[in-house]
Image: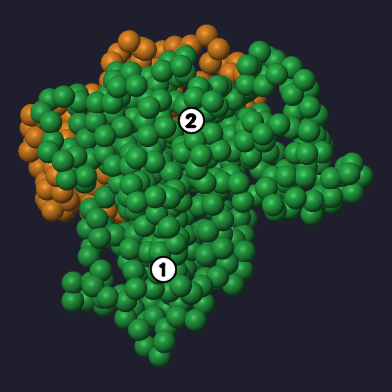
Amino acid sequence: MDETYDVIVMGTGLKECILSGMLSVSGKKVLHVDRNPYYGGESASLTPIDQVFEHFKKSVPENKYGRGREWNVDLIPKFLMANGQLVKLLIHTGVTRYLEFKSVDGSYVYKGGKIYKVPADEKEALATSLMGLFEKRRFKNFLQHVQDYNVDDPKTYKGVEPNMVAKQVYEKYSLDANTQDFTGHALALFRNDEYMAKPCVDLIKRCRLYSDSLARYGKSPYLYPLYGLGELPQGFARLSAIYGGTYMLDKPVDEIVMEDGHVVGVKSQGETAKCGIVVCDPTYAPDRCKKVGQVVRAICILNHPIPNTKDGQSVQIIIPQNQVSRKDDIYVCMVSAAHNVCAKGYYLAIVATTVETSDPEAELQPGLELLGAIEEKFVSVVDLLEPIDDGTENKIFISMSYDATTHFETTCDDVLSLFKRITGEDFDFSKVQHTDTETVE
Amino acid sequence: MASRGGPQRPNGASQGKICQFKLVLLGESAVGKSSLVLRFVKGQFHEYQESTIGAAFLTQTVCLDDTTVKFEIWDTAGQERYHSLAPMYYRGAQAAIVVYDITNPDTFGRAKTWVKELQRQASPNIVIALAGNKADLASKRMVEFDEAQAYAEENSLLFMETSAKTAMNVNDIFLAIAKKLPKSETSGTPQPRQGVRLNNEQGGQQSEGGCCK
Ligand SMILES: Nc1nc2c(ncn2[C@@H]2O[C@H](COP(=O)(O)OP(=O)(O)OP(=O)(O)O)[C@@H](O)[C@H]2O)c(=O)[nH]1
Ligand SMILES: [Mg+2]
């Protein structure tokens, strides 16, 4: 440990592991430590199942859930957008070789107390009872325009200037309140309605991401890695290690050592490793973070698929805030033994939302009600932390907590922003040389 | 020549089946893990092989009768040094080669620890081979062949002494593993390649590259 590094990364959450990989690839000497004996930090998949019960301070039931090692239980639920930034990062860095994915079976949206499949193709769109016949026609026109829209080409605007607010665009296409909910929350994946009063380019960009992602694998725009999301940080950690990064787990961190207002090292178990830059998650530097909100999550073990999803082995359900008189959406993500995350016959559903009241668990009720009988429920309320400064002065670069969104777009935004703050430049994907690509001869 | 990138299977393999297996290497630093892979995949040996950096994922195929066995070979990348090897490393692996250096008894002890770790953590029907490497340095031998073989028998491991330098038993050990691997769908091991590998192309499913010459 008594050595000098360019960068010390603390916490092996997904963001920290991606950064560790990028920095090692860029030629930096990286030490990566974690206080836990496992990879993943907040974005770990806990295994075996006993670890889940211990994590939530519950007693472990005996012989109930099959082989404990068959379980890999995500703490934070998310899916990858098939055409999103994380997939691009995985491909460009070659980390995708260590992983296998499955397309998520279906995406559902909640309307008037029932769930409806988000149409994945023309046929489903024609058949859906989500909207009436005339509304379908109007919606189709809207989608067509979104697909043709190009910010750099005013000819494609057709009366929709980029600075026009989202609400106005809906009105232009005469979309009703339900369709607006559906578009903004189930396609564009906005967490609340703040976007309505903002320029429409973001809405258009997000609708495009959805349809481009859908076009990739068909069933839904979402992907999920076999063995759970915890594979993602591990994959990037391996990338970092391959490029010379040193890994130490189970390593408590005592102190970030400062001199003249900037970081000079990290102290652990009496030893100090020197460095000019620290990258960490908020739990390693709580006094340098502020609380910006809370997320409540309930991890539920089921012994049946979610009702009314045609026995889907992986589904997402979005409950738009308007539908349940809230400000923030409620999300349900479910995966199963088909993804090697639990024993056969079981299903893992996570219900999550941004906390709005003093009784967070009750806020999840509309989501929990959709699940049917629940075998086991683990509830957590976590603070959303953000760094109080951008790190460029003191050279301590802190990531933001994982928000309630069901995909990784904001995760990647934070990572790329951190990389730029750390190095002063955008990440150059061409620096990753595939020295270890397939050899078939 | 293997065909790459094409959507359909290469001609040579059209009548036989292609089985793909993940194989991991384990063992103390400097015992010759990377050298064994390099010898097997590229037929090369470097006297001054650098500690593994940059290259830790290679594939190579071997042919058995009508079956092409494609090994996806994972070499460690130093994460094991401070006991920080990620579970993803041996997860889903159908085969492992645990390597020690016959001139260094400590590495044999460490190899036994890795075998235990694999028996505990990896999939239950994993095929494990023990390789006593650097067999060309017989004059400096510190681990007896009989001792290692007895240990291997007790633990149902394949065993060979190898030399990445002279190529002795290198292809043979991979071939022995290939023979022992179950090759039918009903064999009880989780079937490899259940999901999709991401790539730049539409559709994502990676095409099979195989060869039988
Ligand atoms: N004489 C002899 N030397 C070998 C043999 N195999 C490897 N070496 C040498 O041993 C050294 C270490 O080999 P590596 O292949 O780098 O060992 P490794 O197990 O991959 O080491 P790490 O990547 O550090 O874990 C190199 O100098 C090789 O040239 C062998 O069969 N015979
Ligand atoms: Mg090596």
- The answer to whether residue A249 is left or right of residue A321 is left
Give the colour in which the image draws chain B. Answer: orange
Identify the image quadrant of the C terminus of chain A: top right
Q: Residue type at mark 1: give it.
A: Lys
Q: Between marks 1 and 2, how big is the CA–CA gap?
A: 31 Å
| Residue placed most toward the observer, A287 or A364 | A364
**Residue labelled with disc 2:** A316
Instruction: Residue at the far front: name it.
Output: A325
Residue A117 in view, yes or no: yes
Q: Nearer the viewer, mark 1 or mark 2?
A: 1
Neighbours of disc 1 within 10 Å: few (<14), some (14-19), many (20+): some
Asked if badge 1 and badge 2 are on a common chain, one would say: yes
Callout 1: SS: strand
Q: In which quadrant of the rendered view does residue B57 lie?
A: top left
Callout 2: SS: strand
**Residue labelled with disc 1:** A290
**Chain to which mark 1 belongs:** A
Q: Position of residue A179 (x, y in %)?
A: 67, 31
Residue A230 in view, yes or no: no
**Chain to which mark 2 belongs:** A
Which chain gets the green colouring? A
Question: Is ligand 2 less than 8 Å from the beta carbon at label 2?
Answer: no
Q: Position of residue A396 (x, y in %)?
A: 43, 74
Does residue B129 sit above or below A189 in this rendering?
above
Q: Residue type at mark 2: give it.
A: Gln
| Residue placed most toward the observer, B161 or A35 | A35
